[in-house]
Image (spheres, grey):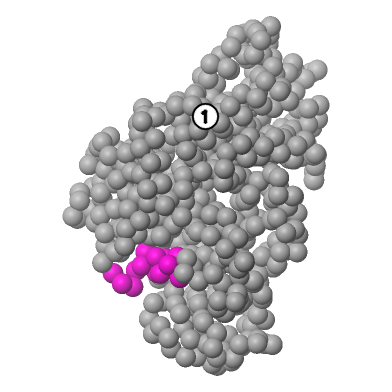
Amino acid sequence: MREQDELHWWQRDAIYQIYPRSFSDSNGDGIGDLRGIVDRLDYLAGADSSLGVGAIWISPFYPSPMADFGYDVVDYTDVDPIFGTLDDFDLLVREAHARGLRVIVDWVPNHSSDEHPWFRESRSSRHNPRRDWYVWRDPARGGGPPNNWRSAFEAVGPAWTFDGATGQYYLNSFTPQQPDLNWENPDVEAAMHEVLRFWLRRGVDGFRIDVVHKLAKDPELRDNQPGLRHDEDWQPTIHDRLRGIRRVVDEFEDRMLVGEVYLRDLRRVVEYINTGDQLDLAHNFVFLFLPWDAQAMRASVEDFEQLAEAAAWPAWFLANHDHPRVASRFADGTPGSGERRARLAAMLICTLRGTPFIYQGEELGLPDAEVPPEAVVDVDGRDPERAPIPWERPSDAGPGAGFSTGAPWLPLPTGAERLAVGAQLGDPGSTLQLVRRILDLRRSEPALQGGSQRRVDSATQVFCFTRESEDGHFVVALNFAGERVRLDPRGAVVRRARVELSTYLTRAPGEEVELGALVIEADEGLILRAM
């Protein structure tokens, strides 16, 4: 059997992240919703002109006061009215599956909202049966928080909030409105496992687990020290806890788990996927935070390969709802550099061996939006990358740009007139058309899915590698320099190749090139078919 025939669905195709507030608004209130996603499914899969992804990951849509825009959950088994109803969710799953599109939902097990009924009971009395469902502690001897743990949000400060009614602090790894659940309590673990089963029975194909590394903390709550964190990734508890989650998901056929493993140590990240009985995929934040540098990218990819066991499969991404968009983050100040680099980044994550994750709008090369101070709503400054998707030119569809008939909840990204989906669909040289062609090539070529990967030594500014299977042999050459560079391959087996795709979309497909003489344009990426 060929290797690609053995791949799981979550290995074969790209996964597309939908931030529902900003994807598509079906009712004109300025906020995206589930029906809006249903309306746009043909853009993603099924239709001839679709983007061609294999799965969607939907950020939280549960009932929430929105202190952290859905990551503060009041009810884990329902839909917030601003997004729709459970019937709308069921419709979304049916319509997605009818197009061959899998559905992954965000699961937020580390913390709930402070308005969740569990927490209301917990804080009502030290003697309430649910008191131990959250992490409560007396003040330190001299007063103040029990230890030195800090919130992940710098603006929040200490990860503890004092509750005057009961005289204790509760742990909040994020905002005070997001108290941490106590996973040391088996009743909490059992309740959260039932949440998984609820959505699995409704047909979801997998879960993205929010801040999964936070599910195991030092039960003695000792202070963090330089180089030693006690508030996350507690060993070996975290891995036993994940095996329990895996067993629940495996009660259902062909489901997957991807985790937000927000650790900057690649060795520890890979431990979450190395054994085959924990996560299927781990989002790699070591890779996300790399500079725009070919050597750094290549070294990180090789580090993963050296650490990975047979069960481990990488997940590649360079943007999500929490981090600036590629076109803004990596722009070097020269005209067009941000968009060129967004195109190169798309080719990079879609040709590396592993699963590419595409954050909504990255296929358009969108930059961050400019959000004036009076429009800021997020506690951690993440509004610019969460701006609504422009579906049509504002000059054609009005200020809502096809996202909404009302006033969008955040300003549209800069350049919406030129970068809107409708504008790019009609432009054969657009970023959207490029990404569609990359994904189409990936789907049709087994070598770009499960094929082997090997580095090619070349010019310092170029990240070059091969992808090979019995069905095909490709060379991928990515120029991270803002100037033209000769590829200069050394020791390459392949001498001649045909151009399959360039991020510039100006090279003629099928053009024959000598790799030793090949000159790559500034910020250009090439997929070449070996001859």
Q: In this view, does 312 lie to the left or right of 448?
A: right
Label 1, on which residue? 198
Foreground residue among 175 and 142: 175
Q: At 42% from the left edge and 86% from the top edge, which residue is drawn?
A: 510
Q: Is residue 384 in sight in this rendering? A: no
Q: What residue type is labelled 1?
A: Phe
Residue at 58% x, 11% y is 121
Vertical placement of 361 versus 77: above or below? below
Closer-to-camera residue (342/168): 342
Q: Tell me where residue 360 appears, x and y as whole percent.
A: 42, 52
Task: Identify the magenta region.
Answer: 427-441
Q: Which residue lies furthest to the front in this view?
A: 1
Q: Where is residue 383 in the image (x, y as percent from the top left)?
A: 44, 44
Q: How crowded is mark 1: few (under 14 residues within 10 Å), some or many (20 or more)?
A: some
Q: Say if residue 168 shows up in the picture.
A: yes
Dominant secondary structure of the residues highlighted in magenta in the image = helix
Which part of the image, by quadrant, shows the N terminus? bottom right
Q: What element carries label 1?
A: helix
- Camera-nearest residue between 257 and 113: 257
Looking at the image, which residue is at 31% across and 62% down? 49
| x and y, in percent, of residue 74 in the image | 50, 23
For residue 159, side relative to residue 482 (left or right): right
Residue 393: image quadrant is bottom left
